[in-house]
Image: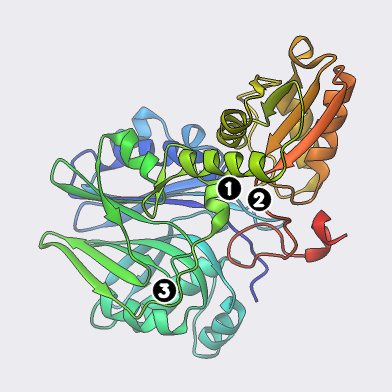
Amino acid sequence: MSSLREECGVFGIFGHNNAANLTYLGLYALQHRGQESAGIAISDGTDLSVLKDLGMVNQIFDAETLYSMKGDRSIGHVRYSTTGSNTVANAQPLVVSYSKGKLALSHNGNLVNADELRRRLESSGSTFQTTTDSEVIANLIARLGRNSIREALVECVKSLKGAYSIVILTENELIGLRDPHGIRPLCLGSLDGSYVLASETCALDTIGATFIRDVRPGEIVSISKKGLESVLTPPGKRASCIFEFIYFARPDSRIDGKNVHMVRSEFGRQLSKEHGVKADIVIPIPDSGISAAIGYYLESGIEYGEGFMKNRYVGRTFIQPRQKDRDFGISLKLNPLREVIEGKSVVCIDDSIVRGTTMKKIVSKLKKAGAREVHVRITSPPYKYACFYGIDTPNSKKLIARI
């Protein structure tokens, strides 16, 4: 079992003369999925190059840098990591050489059999430069890619166990792959005759692309000068990650045919039906609690208000790897509006409780700001078990619902 737990964003475009800039904008739209490193790989049909670094998208790329990246096909990646793995070497896209040239790979998800595959590859001569399971996938593809990358991927799917939405770039081809269970999202769009792949539809909207459809579980889509081709490997039992709807995805995205905001709003409505309470005001924990709080207010009829002001320059606290970083981020991130909540009975809506550290501080802040009562309502069920498919909860003992 791999020690890494990642939630990332991937993007790719083929056949557009503004590929680097569009990939930059796509990654900017996906920044919420990873804030520790970012990268872009680009090809002009003859060569493939990559630029990646630690930091936010706009910290790594500027206009001059993007102008220098020549090519009409590109992929990108935004990433967050766990303790000990936030290095430039682990940033993506990863670039490896294989029998027919180079390939770049961006991966969202986590393999549960990465260590086993790594040992197998090392015993047959492969060497590794990073600690990521994404490099395991890249090496496996390179080893099997004697005839074509697509054929290699069909064979890879038989060995890979876990969650993966992948975009791959060679000198001549852009490929997208989604695991047979459809755990992580991946969608297909078009722009000016070019094809686009992205983790979320919000990235398509940002660049003005038209949504075509979601990539199906187990599907390999290949984009080249010949157009779009698809190979469907045997799908497994459908098992989309509910945390995409609960927390990770942007509210304006559509995943597997469902708008994230509308799903979260329905969560709030159902929460009001099942766990209603008499109170003066409903407030969300911004930003992922807003849609659910709107649903709760619409169902309950209790006044809706903004109880917290969010500092928009502070990143997401749940996906920061170290506890002390999360605690520091919470203190900077939210400031209660005393005039809104003082003397009132407050229903506080949030999407989930994982470790419990965030909610403890939030309730304390509300009490100090004069709230008479604080009724916490959470849209997701108790989070009792560690996830090994891409969420940073490697140990069930850290989950407060298990205590």
Give the residue number, with chain letter if any, for mark 1.
246
The reply to whether dot 1 and dot 3 touch (C-beta < 8 Å) is: no
Residue extending farthest top: 339
Of callouts 3 and 2, the N-terminal one: 3
Q: Nearer the viewer, residue 380 or 320?
A: 380
Q: Disc 1 residue type?
A: Ile
Position of residue 90 in the picture relative to residue 215 (left or right): right
The reply to whether dot 3 and dot 2 touch (C-beta < 8 Å) is: no
Give the residue number, with chain letter if any, for mark 2.
380
Position of residue 289 in the picture relative to residue 202 (left or right): right
Residue extending farthest left: 226
Real-space Cα separation, disc 1 to disc 2, in angstroms: 7 Å
Q: Disc 3 residue type?
A: Pro
The reply to whether dot 1 and dot 2 touch (C-beta < 8 Å) is: yes
Which numbered marker is on residue 180?
3
The picture places residue 297, in percent across and down from the top left corner, at 61, 28
Real-space Cα separation, disc 1 to disc 3, in angstroms: 22 Å
Residue 300 visible somewhere in the drawing = yes
Q: Secondary structure at mark 3?
A: loop
The picture places residue 19, in percent across and down from the top left corner, at 26, 42
The picture places residue 31, in percent across and down from the top left corner, at 50, 40
